[in-house]
């Protein structure tokens, strides 16, 4: 007696499920740990959360999400305008690269120092520095914009006072370059 097509399909399905279950599953780009929910924000779409569909609220959510939950839990729901504003804010925070947290006045400084004949050429100055070199996505603002602006203003003043080719201006520029050396690209 020949086994039926149905028996073959059930056997194939059983074997396939065993093989598939033995393969590793990646829940995140950073490892083998499977993630079923977010720890810093609610599940998507965020407009539903802003509209009061809170689901399970985690204490690890960012404060802006906890405030929304608080408003609904105390019976003071968000207006449609507030909901729209919050969703816009959340989308901005999730899609923005925060290099702008460290605005640069370096261009102003680089332009000013080009007026000095024989000055070492510097094309770019990085103002953000990685907290740990192996984790470049965590940065802090190493060189503040106001420092570059003040240096450019001082250099222009010295050029006016002593002349761009004077040794005093060249010495000052060399000292200022030493100050900004921690800002140069590694």
Image (cartoon, rainbow, N blue to C red):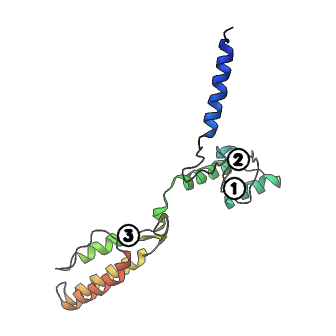
Q: Is the residue 118 above or below the residue 49 in the image?
A: below
N-term-proximal mark, 1 vs 2: 2
Badge 3 local density, few (<14 within 10 Å), some, or many (20+)?
some
Going 67% across and 55% down the picture, which residue do you hit? 39
Do the numbered discs 1 and 2 sit on residues whose CB atoms are within 8 Å?
A: yes
Tell me residue 1's x, y (percent). 69, 8
Do the numbered discs 2 and 3 sit on residues whose CB atoms are within 8 Å?
A: no
Q: Is residue 30 left or right of residue 174?
A: right
Q: In this view, does 106 lie to the left or right of 65?
A: left
N-term-proximal mark, 2 vs 3: 2
Residue hosting label 3: 126
Residue hosting label 1: 65
Do the numbered discs 1 and 3 sit on residues whose CB atoms are within 8 Å?
A: no
Tell me residue 112's x, y (percent). 27, 76
Tell me residue 17's x, y (percent). 65, 31
Badge 1 local density, few (<14 within 10 Å), some, or many (20+)?
many
Q: Nearer the viewer, residue 25 or 27?
A: 25
Badge 2 local density, few (<14 within 10 Å), some, or many (20+)?
some
Residue hosting label 2: 49
Q: Which of 26 and 65 is in front in this view?
A: 26
Going 34% across and 81% down the picture, which residue do you hit? 151
Q: Distance between the residues labelled 1 and 2?
A: 8 Å
Tell me residue 158's x, y (percent). 26, 87
Q: Is the residue 149 above or below the residue 139 in the image?
A: below
Which residue of the protein is positioned furthest toward the right in this rendering?
74
Quadrant position of residue 9: top right
Going 44% across and 71% down the picture, which residue do you hit? 129
């Amino acid at each position: 007696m020949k086994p039926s097509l149905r028996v073959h399909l059930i056997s194939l399905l059983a074997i396939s499920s065993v093989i598939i279950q033995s393969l590793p599953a990646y829940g995140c780009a950073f490892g083998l740990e499977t993630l079923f929910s977010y720890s810093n924000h609610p599940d998507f779409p965020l407009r539903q959360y802003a509209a009061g569909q809170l689901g399970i609220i985690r204490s690890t959510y960012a404060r802006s999400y906890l405030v929304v939950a608080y408003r609904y839990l105390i019976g003071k729901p968000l207006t449609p305008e507030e909901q729209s504003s919050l969703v816009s804010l959340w989308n901005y925070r999730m899609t923005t690269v925060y290099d702008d947290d460290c605005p640069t006045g370096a261009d102003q400084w680089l332009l000013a120092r080009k007026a000095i004949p024989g000055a070492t050429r510097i094309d770019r100055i990085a103002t953000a520095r990685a907290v740990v070199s192996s984790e470049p996505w965590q940065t802090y603002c190493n060189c503040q914009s106001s420092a570059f602006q003040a240096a450019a203003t001082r250099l222009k003043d010295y050029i006016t006072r002593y002349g761009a080719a004077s040794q005093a201006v060249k010495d000052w520029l060399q000292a200022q370059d030493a100050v900004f050396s921690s800002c140069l690209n590694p």
